[in-house]
Amino acid sequence: MRTIHISYRVASAVSAITRKLGFFFSDHHRWLLRHVQRQLRNHADAEDTAAETFCQLLAARVDPATLEQPRAFLSTVARRLIHDRHRRQRLERAYLERLALLPEALAPSPEERLMLLEALDLVDRTLAGLPLAVKKAFLYSQLDGFGYAEIGRRLGVSERTVGRYMNQALRQCYLSGVGP
C-alpha cells in the first residue's frame, strides 16, 4: 500500500510540472520563435531551435516557476543551440569539400557519409574546450595519418610538444568516453 501512495505522489508531482511547462510553453513560445528567427533568418530552423530549447528545459527537469528571468534563460539556451548548429554546419561544409576532392570510386555512400558526419561532430564536441593547436595535432594524426615529426613541422612546434598535444587530446577523448 505504501508503494502505491509514493507512486501516486511522484505521478502527481510530474503531472504538476508538466502542467507548469505547458503554461510556460504557451507563455513564451511565440516570443522565443520570433527571437530565434531574427538570428537565424530561416523559419524552419527557428522552429526547430525553439522546440529544441523547450526539449532541453524538459530534459533538464527545470521547474519553470523557479526561473526569475525565463526569457533570459530561454535566450541563453537557444543561443547555445544556434552556436552548435553553426558549428555543425561549418564542420559539414568542410567535410563535404574534402569529399569532393576524392575520386568518385573512393567516395563513401550516403549512409557512410552520415555516420562519418556524426562521428566528426562527436569528436568536434569532445575537443571543443582544447586549444586549436591541440585539435589540429589530433586531427592531423587521426584523419591524415601524419607522424609527430610531420605534425610538428606543420604546426611549427617540436615533436615533444606534439606528444603533449596528443596526450591532452587523447585524455579529453578518454574522459568523455570517445575513442580515437
Image (tube, rainbow, N blue to C red):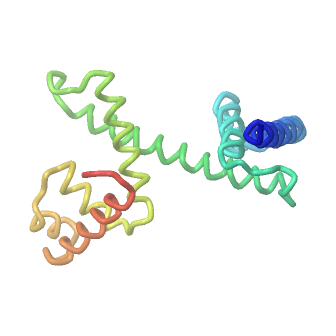
Q: Where residue 17 appears, x then y in whole percent?
A: 82, 42
Pick whichever, 5 or 72, lies toward us.
5
Q: Can you tell which quarter of the image residue 169 is in?
A: bottom left
Q: Can you tell which quarter of the image residue 171 is in?
A: bottom left
State left or right for residue 17 relative to residue 95: right
Residue at figure coordinates x 19%, y 71% from the top left: 162
Residue at figure coordinates x 65%, y 44% from the top left: 59
Q: Can you tell which quarter of the image residue 153 is in?
A: bottom left
State left or right for residue 77 relative to residue 170: right
Q: Where residue 113 appears, x then y in whole percent?
A: 32, 29
Residue at figure coordinates x 67%, y 49% from the top left: 60
User: How many tags in the picture?
Assistant: 0
State left or right for residue 99 relative to residue 81: left
Q: Where residue 174 appears, x then y in whole percent?
A: 31, 59
Q: Where residue 92 appears, x then y in whole percent?
A: 40, 38
Pick whichever, 42 or 122, lies toward us.
122
Q: Is residue 31 among what the camera can see?
A: no
Q: Is residue 108 among what the camera can see?
A: yes
Pick whichever, 179 or 126, lies toward us.
179
Residue at figure coordinates x 54%, y 48% from the top left: 84
Q: Quadrant of the N terminus?
A: top right
Against 147, residue 65 (above or below) is: above
Against 107, residue 164 (above or below) is: below
